[in-house]
Amino acid sequence: MDNVIELKDIWVSYDSIRVLESVTLNVRDKDFLAIIGPNGGGKSTLLKVILGLITPDRGSVRLLGGNPKDMRKYVGYVPQYHSSNLDFPITVWDVVLMGRLSHKGPLQRYNEDDHKAAHEALETVGMLEFKDRQIGELSGGQKQRVFIARSLVTKPKLLILDEPSTGIDSRMQKEFYELLNRLKSEIAIVMVTHDISAISVYIDKIGCLNRKFHYHDDKEISSHDLEVSYQCPVELIAHGVPHRVLKEH
Amino acid sequence: MLEILQYDFMRNAIFAAILASVACGIIGVYVVVKKIVFISGGITHASFGGIGLGYYLGINPLYGLIPFSLFSALVMGLVSKRSKVAEDTAIGILWSLGMAIGIILIYWTPGYAPDLMTYLFGNILTVPMSDIYLMLGLDAVIIFIVYAYYKQFMALCFDEEFTTVAGLSVEKLYLLLLCLIALTVVLLIKVVGIILIIALLTMPASLSRHYTNDLGKMMHISIFFGIFFSIVGLSLSYLFDAPSGATIILVMSSVYILHFLYDGLKPKIAA
């Protein structure tokens, strides 16, 4: 299986408002793709299409070589920060075990394998020592690591992150991208963000999405692409070199 | 005061208080952590239509209540999630609709509806042995389903989006949870009545959150609170000749309010 995601000519409208227009996208094994674009540009919709939560009006979607509705449980998914109820009475350990839920029916308890997988995933993200903490007691960056651990416990081939830098301060962001960089040697990663400064040296490919998708096989984007996507002049400032987002100009 | 225990009605009342506290301790925790108090209130009040149905058909109102409250839970769950009307508006409408059906059916029932007040305000002292068996059965159903779906319900309440992507049907799980709330309403109705059920469903669970970070332990603590408050309330209602349901809620609310006043007065420790 070469392509973990294959989108061909995807069109989506909500009540006659067009959200995605002719989006074509292939993600290969071990790619690290960042999709940027303004709020309301269709980024969340695109993720929902990939995960089979929305059926497009037109176009074909293949996820891990199959139907997204059947295959999405094999994807590691890290939802947007606010979507979890954070004063919820649950420990880090139980949050991570929750990642194994897709392989459990009613009445089945978590077994030795599940515990081993949770242990490994927490070790990978460096959060093992926090396993008995209540999730709300952690900082933004720590929570994000826990949610990544939860998405890793099924050993997915693809990791999808929705706005992962929300709620993380910039110091934590570096550590966070280093974690993703370690992961990308084993799995494909697709990350959606409206924060251009979040694009990092570790990313292989960048796509700009504002209804239409502008896609690059490398991580250099021109200010022209950004202007087309954001529909206004964009000044790109890449923080914290040593990486280059723009061609010299 | 212990001599009252020799009366059958008092023993039944204590059984009923315990059985009701088990259901409301377990399900109340879900109501509180998932923040679905309003839809629970809707299911509770709409189920009055089932009481009316029972009277109209001339059967035990509880047997009209069970199918009707399950049905209204399903309708409310589906309408609030799927319709274009705002969720709280949809719940508010169905809430009143159920009650209106109940009022009309009772009006049409020939003769006098003898213990109508029992269903509205509760009277734990009139619970017959047959109702105790029914409550026992409902408790068994609730405990079994929660045992079977514990992990799934936890995921549903914590993160619906992730649960969907993990391949579970969030809608079916949510409807199942609402049905459990409907069954809990049936269990609680004789204890405190439709009007006061929400208090019983929320206060023990909300109090228990302060003593643990674990969902399962919350259920145990909240069952304990439920039993304790209802027995204390029951005793006080006997001593002061006050209605039992309202006294139970009064005891519970007083403790709840004192607890939060005490919490508020404690010096805050910076996190």
Image (cartoon, rainbow, N blue to C red):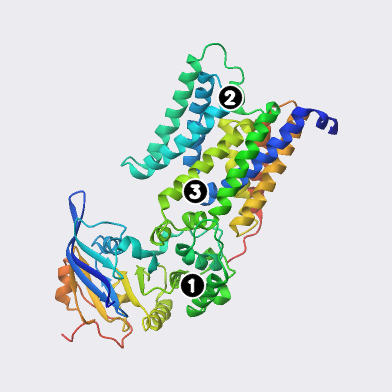
Instruction: Measure how far apart labels 1 and 3 are at the Cα level.
Output: 25 Å
Precedes in sequence: disc 2 or disc 3? 3
Q: Residue at x 25, y 60 (%)?
A: A40
Residue B98, quarter of the rendered image: top left
**From what the image shows, is residue B93 above or below residue A127?**
above
Name the secondary structure under disc 2: loop
- Where is residue A185? Give x, y as percent: 37, 84
* Chain of the residue where label 3 is placed in the rendered structure: B
Front disc: 2 or 1: 2
* Chain of the residue where label 1 is placed in the rendered structure: A
Residue A233 visible in the picture: no
- Where is residue B175? Give x, y as percent: 45, 45
Q: Residue furthest bottom?
A: A242
The kind of residue tagged 3 is Lys
Q: Which mark is residue B60?
A: 2
The kind of residue tagged 1 is Gln
How dense is the environment of label 3, judged by Cα within 10 Å: few (below 14), some, or many (20 and up)? some
- Where is residue B57? Give x, y as percent: 51, 20
Query: Looking at this view, is A197 or B122 the one in front?
Result: B122
Name the secondary structure under disc 1: helix
Q: Is residue A6 left or right of residue B129?
A: left
**From what the image shows, is residue B55 above or below residue B151?**
above
Please give the residue where the numbered disc 1 appears in the rendered image.
A142
Q: Residue at x 36, y 72 (%)?
A: A159
The kind of residue tagged 2 is Asn
Q: Which mark is residue B35?
A: 3
Residue B195 visible in the picture: yes
Q: Is residue A233 left or right of residue A129?
A: left
